[in-house]
Image (cartoon, rainbow, N blue to C red):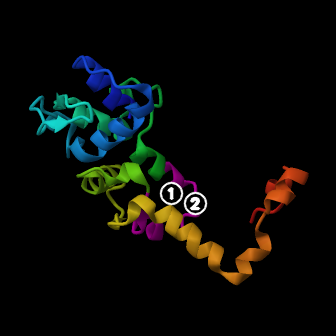
Amino acid sequence: STQSTWALRKQGIELPRAHERDVCNFLKEKLCTVVGDPSEMTDEPSAPYVLPDGKSVSLGRERHLCCEGLFNPSAVGLKSPRGIQSITLESIRKCDADIAPLLYGNIVLSGGSTMFKGLPERMIKEMTALAPSERVKIFAATERKYATWIGGSILASIPTFQDVWITKANYEEQPQCIHRNTF
């Protein structure tokens, strides 16, 4: 969203603060795409989008840079040296070596930022490059934007899980109960 805001300001478009985040998130979701290779980024503008105030906006290279930050944070001015592919690889390598092949073959994308067009394909390309001897498989369900909420809802509905719930009253009485009641 920060990258989308920057792209709009660069075009001389200022949004009211109350709507800025919503409009930028919408633009990000509708116009931004992940390229298979950073060298494929183009300045060719996207189809114009009409903002709530009637102004029209098109994003050029910014529509790719916004997503490139997931794989190469320094491309958008962030100080993190690792993208999502490196963090995923590091997480798998920290696990027991016996289950690593299962983990490489069951990478699940979930959450709003995984909804970018081209992200699953780029992720598999990046992971395969980092771990060429592994059989990498990416799962990107169409409902992945809300997958964590759906999973939480399912988990919360299991009767045996209710034993480990922390009520608001428990938390207000002893906030450290979160550390004690975790798995």
176 or 8: nearer the viewer: 8
Residue 33 seen from this side:
no
The magenta stretch is 90-110
Q: Mark on residue 92?
A: 1
Badge 2 vs badge 1, beta-carbon distance below 8 Å = yes
Q: Position of residue 24 (x, y in %)?
A: 34, 36
Kind of residue at badge 2: Cys
19 or 78: nearer the viewer: 19
Q: Name the residue rendered at 11%, 39% in the picture.
A: 47
Residue 156 seen from this side:
yes
Residue 79 in the image: above or below residue 38: above
Q: Mark on residue 95?
A: 2
Q: Is residue 83 magenta?
A: no
Residue 72 in the image: above or below residue 127: above
* Label 1: which secondary element: helix
Q: Mark on residue 153?
A: none
The quarter of the rendered structure image containing the C terminus is bottom right
Q: Residue furthest bottom?
A: 159
Label 2 CA crowd tier, 10 Å (few <14, some 14–19, many 20+): few
Label 1 CA crowd tier, 10 Å (few <14, some 14–19, many 20+): some
Using the rendered view, name the quadrant where residue 28 is placed.
top left
Q: Position of residue 155 (x, y in %)?
A: 61, 74
Q: Residue furthest right?
A: 173
Kind of residue at badge 1: Ile
Q: Position of residue 71 (x, y in %)?
A: 35, 40
